[in-house]
């Protein structure tokens, strides 16, 4: 099979991961071009309002990372 005939589905897991990372990096570098839907804006506004009403409902980023690392061992 030539390189031209390959599909992204034919990539190895490592190659797929690299592709995802490259795509994510490109999106992050050009985030102003990523569409944000109205429902996403409303959800962020809802969560912000909830946090302002109930400040104790928030979780520190460090605590979130610690929980994830404890759960998944990273």
Image: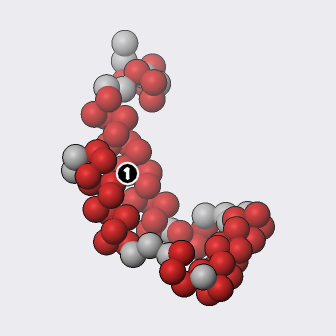
Left or right, 34 with respect to 25, comes to right
Rendered residue at 61%/64% (across/down) = 34
Mark 1, secondary structure of its residue: helix
Asked whether residue 41 appears in the rendered view, the answer is no
**Residue 37 in which image quadrant:** bottom right
Q: What percent of the width, then of the height, locates residue 13?
A: 32, 29
| 57 vs 9: above or below | below
| 37 vs 45: above or below | above
Q: Disc 1 designates what residue?
A: 22
Q: Which residue extends farthest left?
A: 74
Of residue 27 and residue 60, the one placed in the foreground of this image is 60
| 32 vs 74: above or below | below
**Residue 36 in which image quadrant:** bottom right
| 56 vs 12: above or below | below
Of residue 3 and residue 42, the one placed in the foreground of this image is 42
Q: What percent of the width, then of the height, locates residue 43?
A: 70, 68
Q: What percent of the width, then of the height, locates residue 40?
A: 70, 65
Q: Which residue extends farthest top?
A: 1
Rendered residue at 39%/75% (across/down) = 60
Dot 1: few (<14), some (14–19), or many (≥20) neighbours within 10 Å? few
Asked whether residue 64 appears in the rendered view, the answer is yes
Rendered residue at 50%/76% (across/down) = 58
**Residue 66 in which image quadrant:** bottom left
Quadrant location of the N terminus in the rendered image: top left
Q: What percent of the width, then of the height, locates residue 63?
A: 33, 68
Left or right, 8 with respect to 31, comes to left
Rendered residue at 62%/87% (across/down) = 52
């Amino acid at each position: 099979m030539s390189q031209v005939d390959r599909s992204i589905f034919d990539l190895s897991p490592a190659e797929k991961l690299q592709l995802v990372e490259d795509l994510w990096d490109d999106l992050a570098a050009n985030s102003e071009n990523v569409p944000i839907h109205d429902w996403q804006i409303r959800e962020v506004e809802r969560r912000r309002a909830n946090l302002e009403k109930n400040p104790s409902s928030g979780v520190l980023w460090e605590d979130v990372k610690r929980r994830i690392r404890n759960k998944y061992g990273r």
